[in-house]
Image (cartoon, rainbow, N blue to C red):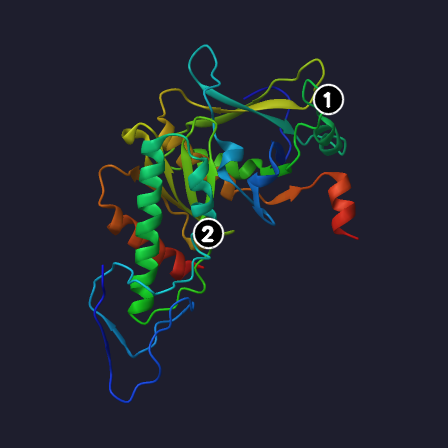
Amino acid sequence: MDGMPYPDNCLRGITGKDMVWEEGIVSPEVFWFGNHTRENGDFVESINWCDDENAVPFTHGQARQHGTPQFVGGIAVVPRVELDNLSLKPAWQGALTYNREPLQDNPYHGNLILVSGISKRVRKAMAAAMALTVTSIIRRPAESALLSG
Amino acid sequence: MKPTEKQASGSPEPLREGVTYAVAPEVVDVTSGTAIPEGWSIDRRITRKANALLPKIEDKKIAETTRDLIGVIEETAYAIVAGGGDIRSLPPVNAALAPDGSVLLEWATRDFRLGFSIDSDPNESGWYVVTSRQLGEIGMNGALSKLDKRSIVSTLVNFALASA
């Protein structure tokens, strides 16, 4: 895919607290590819690569334009091997790929990419499959402190 | 619809209104088919979140389809109970409203996702089953419009019960 090696996990920020249904279980909304597409029509959604120990606090610290935290629901951790496994399935036909796309203010940034032409209905089924690959949810530090008493 | 209920002779008390029964007592012989009889309280834990979402759905067609689907889920659960089955292990249906106005109803555990997406475009409304490696890595999906809702809901409910 790209030159720099990929780490074992990618991080998908969870933008709403109601998208965490139970401990370790996220709503497929976290992986719904919306209408955000590249010029060639491929669907994209942003992730951060867990390249080092700073990737998680960096992701927690990402803010919206008006300064409020972007990922109030926490961070979903997805093993890269699970994404590869999904894409290899006959029904997926290699439709899912990923890349690195470091930004000026985000060196960890990358994308999950779904090939163009997939209907909304099927994208939602794929999102459910991706939600199933989440191995853990890393809550925001303040929440973790509260939960641990 | 008024049900017809018969009690076996020598059986204990009849069903009481407002009481939740997780498992159907043997005395009841409900002849009204899958329609839930008046006065019969089922465990609405399963569809509580889905029902709570209904007032928030702005699109009338989506709301109507969602309401119908919830009704079919409840009737299916009732039919299992009325047949002597136990639905206590059935997880509650999660519900979510998408930014585009579509609705998601889904049973979710760490090992499976069984769901419905309801869209304003009937061709974009669908169902899906995805499971973990432990449950065979099943991945299936289809259009909701092409199927009898009762049969797909029954399949999914029974799968969820068997796998939960």
Disc 2: which chain?
A: B
Q: Quadrant of residue B89?
A: bottom left
Q: Up-down: is B92 above or below B80? A: above
- Can the viewer see residue B131 in this picture? no
Image-based side of A42 in relation to B143, left or right: right
Q: Quadrant of residue B9?
A: bottom left
Q: Residue A67, labelled with which disc?
A: 1
Quadrant showing the N terminus of chain B: bottom left
Give a yes or no on whether discs 2 and 1 share a subunit.
Answer: no
x and y, in percent, of residue A130 in the image: 49, 38
x and y, in percent, of residue A13 in the image: 62, 32
Q: Which residue is mark 2?
A: B48
CB of mark 2 within 8 Å of CB of mark 1? no
Asked whether B136 or A122 is in front, the reply is A122
Q: Residue at x 47, y 39 (%)?
A: B96
Asked whether A133 or B19 is in front, the reply is B19
Check disc 2 and give the amino acid type.
Answer: Arg
Crowd tier of the residue under label 2, counting other residues whose Cα lies within 10 Å: few below 14, some 14–19, many 20 or above: some
Image-based side of A51 in relation to B5, left or right: right
